[in-house]
Image (cartoon, coloured by chain):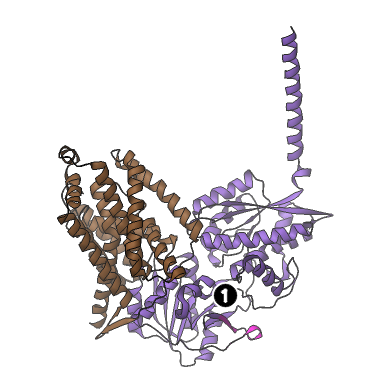
Chain colours: A purple, B brown
Amino acid sequence: MFAHGILRSARAGLLAGGVATGLLAAALNSPALAQETIKIGAPLALTGGLADEGHKQDVVWKMWVEKINAGGGIQVGDKKLKVELIEYDYQSEGQRASQLAEKLINDDKVQFLFSPFGSGHTKIVAGVGERYQIPTIACVASSESVYDQTLKYLFGTLSPNGGMTTAMVKFFKEKFPETKSIAVLGRDDVFPKSMAEGIAKAAEAGGLTVAYKELYPVGTMDHAAALSSIKAAKPDWIYITGYTQDLILARKQMQDLGVTAQIVTMVTGPSYKEFTDGLGPLANGISSSSWWHHLTSYEGQGVWPTTAAFYEDFKARTKGDPDYVHGSCAAAGEVIVDALARAGSLDKAKVRDAIAATDIQTFYGPIKFGPNGMNLSRELPIIQVQDQTIKVLAPAEIKNADMIAMP
Amino acid sequence: MAIYLQILSNGLMLGALYACLAVGFSLVWGVLNVINMLHGSFIILGGYLTFFAWHLYGIHPVAMLPVVAALMFALGFALQKLVINRVVSAPVLTTLTLTFGLDMILYNAMTYWFTATPRRITLDLGAVQLGSIVLPVDRLVGTGLALAMTLLLYAVMRGSSIGRAIVAVRMDRSAAELMGIRTDRIYAITFGIGALMAGVAGVVFATVFPITTNVTGIWLGKAFVVCVVGGLGSVPGALVGGLVLGLVESFAGHWFGPQQAITAGFVLMLVLLLTRPTGLVGVRGYE
């Protein structure tokens, strides 16, 4: 009887405990408390082929979240909400990025997505965000084909690729008026291919002859055949697109095979420090264009009021110089801050409309989205490696060197 | 004409490098019937050892060749002895899955430790001009080393008792065991030689290509194609397969554009699988 009583008490206790736990869980999941933080989900390539790029995004997003939370959070209506960044490693595999975006939305209940590196993977994640009407901010996707899918919830902080080609043709023709022909070799991948196509069109429109134009497939480990053909075509300007490993190999083989021209452009090679580190003196003379450079001097709203403030913070944290990936991704957070302040609520449709109406100045430059969700075109820096450091050739306001011919 | 001579020499140099990367893979596949998915990562590990020895201590890549060879042999031997030998008699899918899993560990560990940033040994040895043909010195040295190591392996397989034992195990494991050959040990030695050759390829490649974990799958894929083209399980097979693939990629890249160069290699592989499954110089029974 006594034992039975104990069991009954225990059961009642357990039941009470269970009910209490259930109530607590329900309370924690209630909209009032769930909205005490703003959750941003980020499928990131922390391992695999895009790990370097993934880590670049990771470091600046963490810097941004720390800064914003240290200031009390993001103003939404009459209260300030802290930010929680939830990251998952998608191992550089697009299919996994899609699955993790679903998990972030359904399990972690994120209100925003930061998209991963590159136009290809952004396309995948943005598709998931669109299905659930979750605003997705892409900071490293510049191919217009990604934004031409009529996705209402996708916004990109990079300007269209087109801004990097026409201005470059005009600038180089001014500097080297004797330039008559161009050879274009591009990697058959979303961004490098669109840049190769873009420069060929811009060059033709600018009165240059396209002496050679070919794409090479992903996984190419030898450019000798293409470079031998380019050598035979004797162009005045050689323009090669690809990722850092492709471009290091191509530059090395150009040197080996004696292939050169007065202008050699590699996109986006010199934008990355690892390109100049990997090539050493061979990088000298190579020109490129970039969406942002830390020598720019923009001022604006956000946790970093000036480019210099961001640069100092970044330098202190990583001991290295930021590139456009860092700048663009750090600015992506400011888009959310600004939109929430104007929307005054977390309502999906209101927030989406507020992002679409973004028109702000930041340390990264102006951010104003066009009808397709891309940051509007602006004058982008043209850069060149001189003495193994990056020099800015244009625009004139931030220029710190004159262009030189390839040594 | 000059451009064709240039493309011919490009193709031959590339082909010798392909032969070097595939010979260890071919040996392990032919003798152990193990499709070693670790092979691409072994090559890059050899490349990283060479790069860091040069970058941190200024050791010339050629001086690292015996060191990397010894370390990689030890790694391969230990892996086979302790892990792969436990399932070596299982169907090929089991060993393939095992080496795939081991590769994921090694690949991600390397990406974690070294990051995927492409690194390069900036020796830049220049080029030799022969008439209108330009021959990059590092590729020439790489070609020489690749051919020398491949021929050395051939000599070991033909002339040493270990080599004969490996060939005997490849031909008939049961008969070899009855003759007193310790097959487990021969398997470990063979896998060790496979890793050693991958490491040597890594040393050679470190002077020619950027080193990054991004390319492990690419090198593994090349090894597959070379083995199928040349024929499995034989050193001459890897050499012939490598040279043919190098030439086909170079000429296809020139004639049909670089976009078709890799495709041409795979088309050749498919044609050979249909018409000559043993490969160009492979041994019947290993197709």
Residue at 44% over, 50% down? B104
- Three-letter amino acid code at the position of disc 1: Ser
Please, which residue is most extreme toward the bottom here? A178
Q: Nearer the viewer, residue B117 or A169?
A: B117
Query: In this figure, what is the number of numbered marks?
Result: 1
Q: Chain of mark 1?
A: A
Specify whether A354 is left or right of A130.
Answer: right
Q: Write down the region rendered in magenta.
A: A390-403
Q: Which residue is denoted by mark 1 in the rendering?
A: A290
Where is B59 relative to B153, above or below? below
x and y percent of residue A1 in the render?
74, 6
Q: Quadrant of the C terminus of chain A?
A: bottom left
Q: Is residue A331 above or below residue B180?
A: below
- Note whether residue A157 is visible: no
Residue B260, visible in the rendered structure:
yes
Residue B153 picture location, percent across and down: 22, 59
Q: Is A302 inside the magenta-drawn segment?
A: no
* Image x and y of residue A58, in percent: 61, 59
Q: Residue furthest right?
A: A78
Q: Which residue is nearer to you in this view: B73 or A88?
A: B73
- SS under mark 1: loop
- Residue B148, picture quadrant: bottom left
Crowd band around label 1 with a 10 angstrom C-alpha radius: few (<14), some (14–19), many (20+): many
* Picture quadrant of residue B40: bottom left
Q: Nearer the viewer, residue A360 or B137?
A: B137
Left or right: A240 in relation to B18: right
Is residue A142 found left or right of A363 in the rendered image? left
- B50 is higher (above) or lower (below) than A269: above
